[in-house]
Amino acid sequence: MNLSRLWRTVKYLSAEQWFYRFVCRGERARMGMFPAATRKRIDRAADALPVPDVCRPELRKIAEAVLLLQHTVHGYDPSGVRVGKFSLLNQDFDFGSVENIFWRGEFHEGNNPLRRMNLAYMGYVVPLLAEGKEGDLDIVCQILDGLEDQNPWSAPGVFRDVWNAYTASHRLTNLLSGLALFRQAGASSSEEAEARILDHTRLCAAFIRANLERDLQYNHLLKNYVALTVFSAAVGGLPASFGFLPKALRKSVAQNILPDGGHAERCPMYHVLSILDFEVLCASGVFDDELSNLLAKTKADMEGALPVMSHPDGEVALFNDSWIGEAPPADQIVDLAGTAETVRLRDAGYVRLGRGGDAVIFDCGLCGPDDNPGHAHADFLSIEASVNRHRLIVDPAIPTYTAGELRNVSRSAASHNGPHLSGVEPIEFWKSFRVGRRGRAAELRSDDLAEFAPIWCAGRHDGYAHIGVETRRYIALWPGESLLICDLMQGNFATESASSFLIPQAWDIKESGPLSFSQEGVTITVEALIGELSRPDNDGYWPRFGVEMPAHKISVSPVQNGDQRFVALWLSWSDVATPLEPEALSGLFDRLSAC
């Protein structure tokens, strides 16, 4: 074990996280050592909980938000579920029947249990039961029987995946929502099957209550609280053992949601998922007016922040651990049509420039909260860009959560659309979600930079400060015409540097003349005003989890003058677009250096 790296990782943990790392991990170890006693204890707690009423109007309203999510994840045709076919994070699994589901099998997930967890979330039962077809309750019961039979609490690893509190939180919410939709569809209900499912939700609620993820906190702990809130809505109020929830939820809201409405973990995908969580919390009807108003205001703030992280195609940017298909498109949550030309999230560290079908989204904030940056990537000063509603510059997104080379490469600075040094990382990544040393980025706002373009933004980061280098970037957009990207590195250089960009291969390369890309009648001409532009290499990106799509990768090598390195890249898609004159460009870099 690298003790110095370990210290650089854990020194940011709060006293509460330190305390609960021992408490929660000790409890999980105890459960593994004494599974029978643990099950008896949780069963007693479950028996003490009220039986949910799936006809309650609050639960039906909750179920609408859950159905929107599960239609996105699992589609609108649940027929495959009836015969044991599932799509889990873009991989298909055919068990032949629901009775033959092999819960402890190989799910092509390496050392991360995410696909097994997704199967155990049981999100697919929501669109299934929403159809209101007789017999589907029995299918859900058969799935539950297999889950419980094959995942006894004595099974190795069971508390890491199927009986993880985060997994149980999803499962509770999905089962209750599915039952509410089933009743709403007017289906004839089997009392025995419904009682079986409700007993499992009580077991989940008791398990979550006893295993709150206070060691991880953030989105995991919030998800625990959301699940307990859903259960409370289904029983018409907070059970006695859930009396802690209002105070805990206030604290979790402050931890997860920044003052500007951005999500603390800086993942646009999780931002959308959290909006749905707050919709569930607001619909529950179990909190007093003060907390209800706080939840409603927070949800409104998050909805106001979402356009800053969204493209003209209606989907979010893919910074940090984000991908498409895990959350509803942004334009299904908020109206993006009226987004201003320049919008920013000062706390979250995102800026969006755009008009019509052209947009640039700039990441100039922290990589995540210091005490839980597990979803961070080294995307400081990185951008995503769209032209005419087509994504032009894309983030690499997520190939895997499994620890190893692919996870490391996908999180590295060289894989993102920002300036980077060769062989040096601005963030020290290890394992799947660990972060040791980490740099910090911030937006640069100076009137001295305002005269060069109609809409612009700039930022800096100190991720290379440990080797004596500082990095700055300036972005300018002329909507309908062109984009300028200027990078400045200053310091004592001991390695090469470059500014690289990923462009989907949906953009065809023009084989001769100046470098250009075309798609559906739009042609983008690319020129290095300062620096040496490479010919495109073949690369890839993963806009959907684990699904690689081909991409072109272009790089610009800088020009060095003393202790400064300069790159200026010009992309244009209009005959009237004119790059800055060399004198103006020189003045821009002078001012960028002085900021």
Image (cartoon, rainbow, N blue to C red):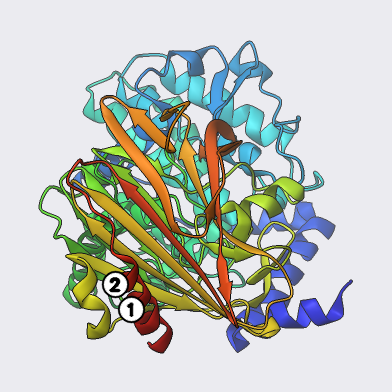
Percent position (x, y) of residue 418? 51, 61
Compared with 487, 52 (above or below) is above
Front in this rendered view, residue 225 or 566: 566
The amino acid at mark 1 is Gly
Is residue 238 found left or right of 464 in the rendered image? left
Few, some or many residues within 10 Å of mark 1 (<14, 14–19, 20+): some
Mark 1, secondary structure of its residue = helix
Few, some or many residues within 10 Å of mark 2 (<14, 14–19, 20+): few
Compared with 148, 412 (above or below) is below
Question: In the figure, residue 91 lies in which quadrant?
Answer: top right
Which residue is found at the position 89% from the left and 71% from the top? 1
Percent position (x, y) of residue 315? 32, 43
Mark 2, secondary structure of its residue = helix
Mark 1, residue position = 587
- State the CA–CA distance, disc 1 to disc 2: 5 Å
Compared with 6, 595 (above or below) is below
Compared with 45, 301 (above or below) is below
Is residue 169 found left or right of 41 in the rendered image? left
Question: In the figure, residue 342 lies in which quadrant?
Answer: bottom left
Mark 2, residue position = 584
The amino acid at mark 2 is Ala
Percent position (x, y) of residue 51? 40, 47
Disc 1, disc 2: CB below 8 Å? yes
